[in-house]
Image (tube, rainbow, N blue to C red):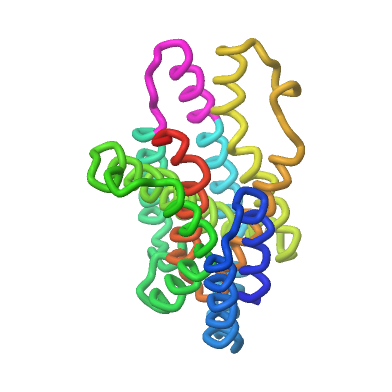
Amino acid sequence: MPFVLFLASLVVAFSVLNFSISAVVAIILTAILIYVVFSKTSSADYIYDEMAQGYIKLDGLIAIAFFTIKIVAFYIAGWALNNARLYLGVPISLALLALVFVILRIKKQGLATIGLTSANFGKSSLLGLSMSVPFIIRAAKMFHVEHFYSINFLYSVFFYLVVISFCEEVSFRGYIQTRLHGLIKSGPLAILVGGLMFATMHIPFQAAWAYFATGQTLMQWIEPLQLLLWIWNHIIFVIMYRRFNSLAGPVIFHFFVNFSIIQPIFFV
């Protein structure tokens, strides 16, 4: 399965990269590494399934309520960015992350139930790094040495690693997706619904900003291909999470995908 995941990442990577021979060699070696290290079935897959199937309807409803709050908050952030030139993405993302921890405390559910555990941390991290090779190569090609010492670069690492990758993985893959099983007992269907929700989550902020900045309506702004890409990304992240019942890999992979594709435009 990880080998298939790696090939899936290449589908995205090849659309944005022009690979040199050395890059192709690195990818082939990485694919071999993934196949050798992760080819055996992991017991964590069963742990994830048992945990997910243990949630009840109330857990699912609370997750839906949390998702609704997230949607509204991001729409407000998009409105604020255009009308007040005030970016609220960082405080809102951190506040929503804190809300997840509050819900866990009230429900008496441990951090392991959202993928924050030391078990299989190393293997999950290695999987995330291995799958990130194409995007690491892209970042290396885009950035210059002087960027690594700038405050802007360090803030960008914090932003894409903590505010975007960590917060999204914990709140969505760790919390919302797992609790959806309390409402939807079919695993594949729950993941598909989660994917639709993940794609929808990206719309309010960007659509609000687009509307107030350019006057575009929601239907004018949405690109079906982008929605499908978000759903596809969600499926990949969930499979990575299930593999070792850890969010370490998804967080790392999520970080390098976003950082290598989005962030370089601010430096070049």
**As displayed, is residue 267 above or below residue 10?**
above
Q: Report the residue at 65% width, 55% height from top.
A: 14
Which quadrant is home to the N terminus? bottom right
Name the spot of residue 170 as percent of width and height, x first: 45, 54
Q: Nearer the viewer, residue 243 or 215?
A: 215
Name the spot of residue 233 as percent of width and height, x first: 63, 54
**As displayed, is residue 3 above or below residue 233?**
below
Name the spot of residue 68 as percent of width and height, x first: 57, 36
In the displayed structure image, the side of residue 173 where residue 144 appears, left or right: left
Which secondary structure is most common in the magenta stretch? helix
In the displayed structure image, the side of residue 257 where residue 88 appears, left or right: left
Q: Which residues are magenta?
A: 72-89
In the displayed structure image, the side of residue 2 where residue 124 appears, left or right: left
Does 78 lie within the magenta span? yes
Q: Nearer the viewer, residue 125 or 120?
A: 125
**As displayed, is residue 5 above or below residue 209?**
below
Q: Report the residue at 50% width, 72% height from top.
A: 127
Query: Where on the picture, by quarter, is residue 23?
Result: bottom right
In the displayed structure image, the side of residue 231 where residue 257 appears, left or right: left
